[in-house]
Each structure stands twice: as structure tokens, then as C-alpha cells.
Image (tube, helix red, strand yellow):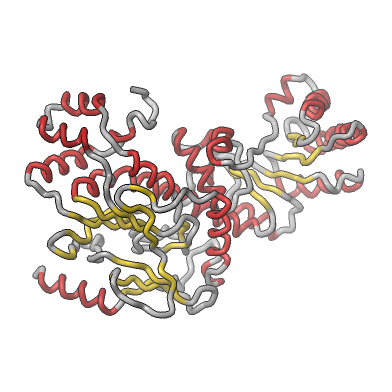
Amino acid sequence: MSDWVGDDNIALLTDLYELTMAASYFENDMRDQATFDLFIRELPEQRNFLVACGLEQALSYLENLHFTEDHLGYLRSLDLFEDRFLSFLGDLRFTGEVWAVPEGEAIFACEPLVRVTAPLIEAQIVESFLLNCLTFQTMIASKAARLKIACGDREFVDYSLRRDHGVDAALKAARASFVAGAVGTSNVLAGKLYGIPVSGTMAHSYVMAFGDEISAFRAYARQFADRTVLLIDTFDVEEGTRNAVRVAKETEAAGGKVDAVRIDSGDLADLTRSVRKILDEDGLDHVKIVLSGDLDEYRIRRLLEANVPADVFGVGTQLGTSGDAASLGGAYKLVQDSNGPRIKLSAGKATTPGRKQVVRFGDGNDERHDLITLEDEEVAGGRPLLERVMAEGHPTRPPEPLAVLKDRCRRAVTSLPERLLTLEGTPDPYQVRLSSRLRDLVDQMHRSSR
């Protein structure tokens, strides 16, 4: 078995207590249908909305979930599980139904992002993976959406691969970033797997390896004449710009083109203005300026508010780790089983019972709000968010192209009330309400628990 997470071992990517609970359910013949909601308890401090992401990978996991003989051999070695249960696991497949908010849609705290209904053991055992998959990509997509707000009509690219917390995180960060507004990624594997445009320049080591800057620029431009981006801050930015000008003119004379120059250090505002001036004076107003170096949405906003003439931003650490809000409080809770609705009453962690729908009202205006209803309620005038995406263990439709998710995200975010499109938390948060029937059910279950 590989020490990388892959199709050959992913069934064991779970917390032990999922398996011990499943073993106890099995022993007590608890096989009836159960429904779990996956939701985010509360928005991080500076977030006014989140962007749903990660569903495609979650559905693939559910459809292909199975325990191999190798898995069962390891579980047997723990001396925790009886052979009858391990035999049951060997035959286990996910057979349930999933309703979910489409990827790219804006969501809010306490709204079901995914609703899973399946035999209890199946629904329970998938908890850890679903939380990992969906909350991480939702966190990164939400960060990327903020970068898009800060950039306005400028572009940004995911440069986070070397900073992300693990190799799979780097893949999923590239995907989620693209869904929520990035125009590309430096991550070549993400480009292959997801069809995301790949982008890159050169490292300072490349320039230093040639001994002098202009030789490095000439070599690179000769080899990549149709998509050359030159890194100009290895030594002196203004001298680097003048070298880039010389190489750009030589390249154009030979039928090629220098697309952009990149600055990765120093006073980005002053340097960018100086570089733009040199380029324009030499007739290279078509050459773009790419900025990178510990950027986030706040630094980008300050640069653009100061009218800094940058065209593209490369964002790494702060994007791939969602630096200012590096986790989401995701939860996966039982809300209904064969005995009816279920509720958790723990202080600060109470849940909302029953199978539910989320209905969005007032798209595109300041009266917009969401109403969480019971699934069988008929509510006029709103748009249901949860869609059935899996039935009897199989997706109900093919995976959506990333271009569709990207367009959905753009429409979802731009249609939010203006007060939510800021980088600071708003004192007037988005309203998520419970229907009267759902409120009555909550009240009734609180009373019956006393």
C-alpha cells in the first residue's frame, strides 16, 4: 500500500471512532436509514459569505468507497473488530442519497452544505472524509473570492503549491482557487487533472545561474518566445527593467513577444510605477507587470487604491493556507433517523433537526435572505439551493466543468448585497432564517428534552 493517499487506501482515511461506532451499530443491528447534515457553524471573523466547493471529489469518494483485503488485514491487526464486522466492511458500498449546494454557490453559517441519507453505518463512516474534503475547498474558494473582490478587473494566479499544507492540499487549493476567480495556477499537476491554465516565470536562481541577467533573459526568451515573463528583481529592478526592454525588442524583431515582467520583492508600489514608466517610454506599453511576494487581498487592495499600475498578482501562502482564516468549523451531525428528527442541545453546538432545504429569496437585491425549511415544505417565491446529486450510491449527473463552476461563483458573488462585498466583517450580516414549521419543531424538541 502506498504511503500517499490514493484510490488504493482512501477507505482508511478516516478517524478511528467512525469505525468503532460502525462496529457498535453493526453489533446492535442498527441498519435503518439516517440523515446527516454537513454545515459550517459560523463564519470566520472577516468573512461575510463562503463559497461552496469540493463536491465533485466528495461524490467520487462516496461512489468508489470500498475496503480491500489489505485494509481489513490492518484493521484485524488492531484487535478491535470482530471478523463478522470486518466481513461486513468487505462488502460495504455507499448506497445512499446526497443533496448538496452546487459548487460555486455562496453559502452562510448553519446552512446544510451537504445532506446525506443512507443506512446508518454508511452515513456515519464517511463523516471524516467529507468534512476534510468539503471544508478545505470551501475555505480556499472563499479566500479566492475575496482576492477576486480586491483585484476587481485585474487578474490573480495561484502560486501556493510550495506553501500549502500537503500535496493533496496543493491540488485542491488550485482547483478551489480557480473556481472562485483565479485565472490560472503554477501547479502543473492541477493543470493536467483539472484543465486549469498553468502559469509561471522563472526563479532568481535561474538568473543567477547564467552569471548575468541579460544572458538569462535572452536564453529564456529564445526558448519560450511566445509566452515570456521575465523576473526583474534579482539584482536591481530598474536595471532589470532596462535589460528586459532590450530583450523584448530583440524578441519582437525575431517574431516573438515578451508578455510581462515580474517583481517579487521590494517596495512594490514605487517599483511598479518606475517599471511602468520605463516600459512605456520604450514603446512597450503592452508588456504587463506581474506582482508577487507575500500578497493577500488587503495588500492588493492597498496597491490598487494607490493606483499602482499592476496587471496580474501571483498569490501563494495567503491563498493556499487561507492565512487569516485557516480553518472552518465544519460539522456533520445526525438530524433524522427511523425514529424521526434528532437534535443536539450542547451549549454553543446545538443543531437543527430534520431533513431540510435552503431557499434563497431576493437574488440581486438588499432584501435577499435565506430560509431554512423542512424538506417537504412548499415555499413560494424562492430558489431552492440543495439539489439531489446522488441516488442509490451513484451521481445523478456527470461532473460539471470547472468553467461552469467558475461562472456560477462569479454570478453568485456579484449578486450578493453590496454590504457583503467588503474585506471586513459587516455589522449587518446576511440573514438566514428558520421557517415557522422548523422553529416549531426546534421548540417542541427542546421542550420534550426537559
- 387 above or below 162? below
Q: Is residue 232 visible?
A: no
Q: Quadrant of the C terminus?
A: bottom left
Q: How many marks?
A: 0
Residue 191 position, x and y percent, is 58, 37
Residue positioned 35% across, 64% down in the render: 111
Q: Residue at x 50, y 38 (%)?
A: 171
The image position of residue 335, as x and y in percent, is 22, 61
Nearest to the observer: residue 445 or residue 299 = 445
Q: Nearer the viewer, residue 449 or 429?
A: 449
User: Taking 181 as reference, is 139 left or right?
Assistant: left
Relative placement, left or right, of 106 versus 191 is left
At which x and y percent is residue 410?
57, 60
- Nearest the viewer among 239 and 395 is 395
Q: Residue at x 62, y 52 (%)?
A: 299
Up/down of 41 relative to 230, above or below: below
